[in-house]
Image (cartoon, grey):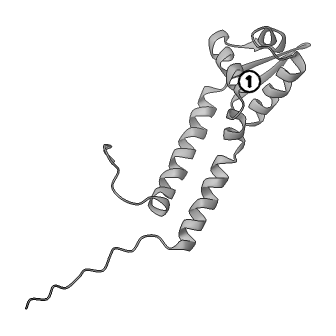
Amino acid sequence: MRTYAHKPAPRGPTRSLRRKAAGDLDTILESKLFRALCEPARIELLKLLTLEGRSDIASLARGVPQDRSVVSRHLELLRSAGLVRRQKVGRNVFFEADGPAVVAQLEDVLVRFRGLVPLCCPGKARGRAT
């Protein structure tokens, strides 16, 4: 009778490493960037800024169903999240999408998430070259 040696199953990340990865993922997803993007009205404002370019609050408020005060609060959240720039000219305040800052933030998220992949979901990537 022949006996076969069984290879031990490959060990994946420990529970504590997975817990750390989950905490890191929570930090990423709860960032100002993602919180700002969770509101459809703010996404609509970003679209308007993309379409119209540099605009003041009054112009933006005409393109959405919210009052100017609500638009102003949304724009301030977008600004604090690094998605838009604000410039005051006299009594007017203008906003514009901050493309380079958005790209830098998304690249940072990508780098951070790539670091989590081996801890949360190891294995070969399917259908993608690495």
In the rendering, at what x and y percent does residue 124 appear? 33, 55
Q: Is residue 2 left or right of residue 58?
A: left
Which image quarter: residue 15? bottom right
Q: Position of residue 71 (x, y in %)?
A: 82, 21
Q: Could you tell me which secondary element the residue under label 1 belongs to? A: helix
Task: Please say if 89 is above or below 20.
Answer: above
Residue 36 position (above or below residue 71): below
Mark 1 surroundings within 10 Å by alpha-carbon count, few (fewer than 14), some (14 through 19), many (20 or more): some
Instruction: Name the residue type under label 1.
Output: Ala
Tell me if 62 is positioned left or right of 83 in this view: right
Percent across and percent down for residue 62 are 79, 8
Residue at numbered disc 1: 41
Left or right of 107, for residue 66: right
* The N terminus, quarter of image: bottom left
Report the residue at 82% width, 15% height from top: 57
Q: Residue furthest bottom?
A: 1
At horizontal 34% and vertical 73% (from top left) the residue drawn is: 10
Residue that appears at 46% across and 70% down: 13
